[in-house]
Amino acid sequence: MIEAAMPVERPDLQLLADDEPAPYEILNEAGDAPLLLLCDHATNFMPRAFRLLGLDEARLARHIAWDIGIAEVTRDLARRLDAPAVLSRFSRLIVDPNRQIDDPTLIPQIGDGVVVPGNRDLTPEARAARIDGFHRPYHAAVARTLDALRARGPGPAVVSMHSFTPVMKGFERPWEIGILWNEDGRLSQPLMARLRAQGLTVGDNQPYSGRGGHGHTLQAHADPRGLANALIEVRQDLIDTHHGAAQWSALLAKVLAEVLSDRQIFGAEGRG
């Protein structure tokens, strides 16, 4: 069932006001860990120019607008591991930074059964303004941070942080956590093994596959640079409170520290 939504006026091409945040945030840039954390869907923030894209606050609080809980986990994980992190500072309903420019879901017209009026019938100029104003600056920040860390060495490994809904289309997802990966198993394989050793039900390229569009950020930045990488998906009902987020950041910090202690993941061993 597709839900109705309020009509919306088109925003002009001045998308960010002077008092609104930049499209990305870099945390702990001088952190010592050989790791970069990324958070593509950290927030549901909507600049005023978009007039909420014709949605109400209740819809913007849902998964269609952001990955609930994962920004808090990422921030705490960066602190625990002394790792740099790059987080988005805009809702993925504006433009999804974890999608290629030519992906039809880059600017979604429908999300989880909800029509997004402000994303319908966009002009080429309006689409380009979103890409240039949000998507490109976020990815440029990721690229700059990665290159600086590479120059410092070793690695770094790259972990993209996400969360997923407990139920999708009536299916109760059994995994507490999923590890998505493409062709490079140096990080994903030991990470899954250690998480399973904690008694967790771990999805291997579940609930999504890292070999498709869901892994765009890693495929754009980590794979071409030959860096070990993985995308972590945590189930949202486990991290939608401060207590839950803290528990999971502590668990992930322990497991990632153990995996990163094996310097072989920073070489070519274990690929494929």
Image (cartoon, grey):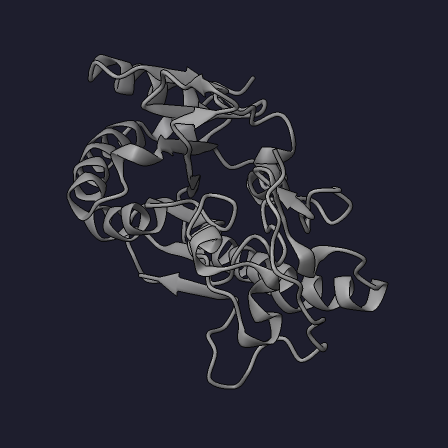
- Determine whether, in the image, residue 48 is placed left or right of residue 238: right
Name the spot of residue 188 as percent of width and height, x first.
42, 23
Name the spot of residue 117 as percent of width and height, x first.
68, 57
Using the image as rendered, state which of residue 169 and residue 138 is in the foreground. 169
- Determine whether, in the image, residue 115 is placed left or right of residue 102: left
Q: Residue at x 43, y 54 (%)?
A: 58
| Image position of 124 with respect to 40: above or below | below
Q: Residue at x 56, y 60 (%)?
A: 138
Q: Quadrant of the N terminus?
A: top right
Using the image as rendered, state which of residue 163 and residue 38 is in the foreground. 163
- Determine whether, in the image, residue 78 is placed left or right of residue 183: left
- Determine whether, in the image, residue 190 is placed left or right of residue 91: left
Among the 4 quarters of the image, the one containing residue 53: bottom right
Residue at the outermost bottom position: 18
Using the image as rendered, state which of residue 121 and residue 236 is in the foreground. 121
| Image position of 199 with respect to 125: above or below | above
Q: Residue at x 28, y 14 (%)?
A: 196
Name the spot of residue 162 as percent of width and height, x first.
43, 39
| Image position of 50 with respect to 72: above or below | below
Report if residue 3 is visible in the image. Answer: yes
Q: Residue at x 51, y 37 (%)?
A: 227
Name the spot of residue 126 as percent of width and height, x first.
77, 67
Report if residue 187 is visible in the image. Answer: no
